[in-house]
Image (cartoon, rainbow, N blue to C red):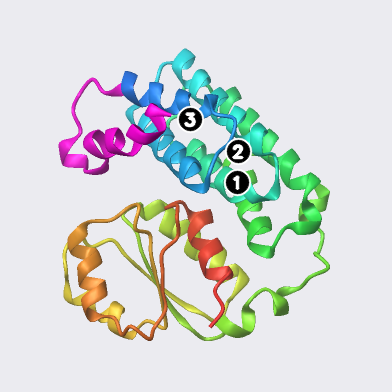
């Protein structure tokens, strides 16, 4: 209980602001992730913290043994939830594993296989964006999509938000440019008539303020941002226009937020 109370403060003190990150914090990151993995229950906030910790660790480069242990902890978290509710988080984790240095490719592939099995068991509940994200990850991990993934789902795009997003201009702000690019690709495949603009500006630029004013829908991946950018968007955006703030900052979180949007 003490750990749960202190976790956010520890994480913020060491890892929220990149310019304050100290060398030699790898053991602390590993311990924090392990403690989350040991918990029996995980809130959405717990899952996002685990994703951030994994992202920090994998970006630093790991030895094969450490890498396998980290991926093993992530698999345990996935196994404990093992429902469609954790699939979006799993997609974000698989994306991190796909684009980060892989000290043990077999471990990374093993996580994706587990995620694929979870998706297959819940195929009747998957949305179109789930399927497109899975197809893209199959390419990343150089595996053939399973037959069920290529089948046309019973529920077509008409009930999946297409009418709401038709011809809309969507702005996506994130400092993780690769996640923004992947999210744009998935969204354009699902909704080919939308316009999507990406922005990664650290401060209040003319381009960012213009997007805040004019975009029909603005997605602000706040877990990956600078304070100056946030206040720039808030100050220039009409309060009546949608400002979506996904809990995570991976492409799956961004796409889910847009696909679930209802005007």
Closest to the observer: 146 or 164? 164
Q: Residue at x 60, y 23 (%)?
A: 106
The residue beneath circle 1 is 137
List the single residue furthest toward the front.
Answer: 1
Side of 18 relative to 94 (left or right): left
Query: 10 Å neighbourhood of mark 1: few (<14), some, or many (≥20)?
Result: some
Estimate the spatial distance between the alpha carbons at disc 2 and disc 3, rounded to whole Å: 27 Å
Which of discs 2 and 3 lies nearer the camera? The answer is 3
Closest to the observer: 122 or 116? 122
Q: Secondary structure at mark 3?
A: helix
* Residue 4 part of the magenta-drawn span: yes
The residue beneath circle 2 is 141
Estimate the spatial distance between the alpha carbons at disc 2 and disc 1, rounded to whole Å: 6 Å
Estimate the spatial distance between the alpha carbons at disc 1 and disc 3, rounded to whole Å: 25 Å
Which of discs 1 and 3 lies nearer the camera? The answer is 3
Locate the N terminus and report the quarter of the image it occupies.
Answer: top left
Side of 146 relative to 222 (left or right): right
Query: 10 Å neighbourhood of mark 3: few (<14), some, or many (≥20)?
Result: many
Magenta stretch?
Answer: 1-26
The residue beneath circle 3 is 36
* Residue 22 part of the magenta-drawn span: yes
Side of 223 relative to 193 (left or right): left
Contact between labelled residues 1 and 2, with CB atoms less than 8 Å apart: yes
Side of 226 relative to 95 (left or right): left
């Amino acid at each position: 209980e003490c750990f749960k109370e202190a976790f956010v403060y520890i994480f913020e003190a060491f890892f929220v602001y990149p310019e304050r990150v100290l060398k030699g914090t790898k053991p602390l990151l590993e311990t924090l992730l392990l403690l989350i993995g040991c918990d029996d229950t995980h809130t959405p906030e717990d899952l996002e913290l685990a994703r951030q910790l994994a992202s920090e660790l994998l970006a630093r480069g790991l030895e094969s043994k450490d890498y396998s242990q980290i991926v093993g902890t992530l698999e345990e978290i996935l196994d404990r939830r093992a429902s469609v509710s954790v699939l979006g988080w799993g997609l974000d984790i698989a994306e991190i594993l796909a684009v980060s240095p892989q000290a043990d490719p077999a471990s990374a592939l093993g996580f994706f296989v587990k995620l694929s099995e979870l998706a297959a068991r819940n195929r009747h509940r998957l949305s179109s964006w789930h399927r497109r994200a899975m197809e893209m990850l199959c390419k990343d991990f150089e595996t053939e999509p399973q037959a069920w993934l290529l089948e046309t789902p019973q529920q077509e795009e008409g009930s999946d938000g297409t009418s709401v997003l038709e011809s809309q201009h969507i702005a996506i702000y994130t400092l993780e440019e690769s996640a923004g690019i992947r999210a744009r690709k998935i969204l354009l495949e699902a909704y080919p008539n939308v316009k999507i603009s990406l922005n990664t500006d650290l401060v209040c630029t003319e381009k960012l303020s213009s997007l805040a004013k004019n975009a029909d829908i603005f997605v602000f991946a706040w877990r990956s941002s600078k304070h100056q950018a946030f206040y720039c968007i808030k100050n220039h955006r009409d309060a009546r226009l949608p400002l979506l703030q996904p809990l995570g900052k991976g492409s799956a979180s961004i796409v889910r937020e847009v696909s679930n949007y209802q005007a």
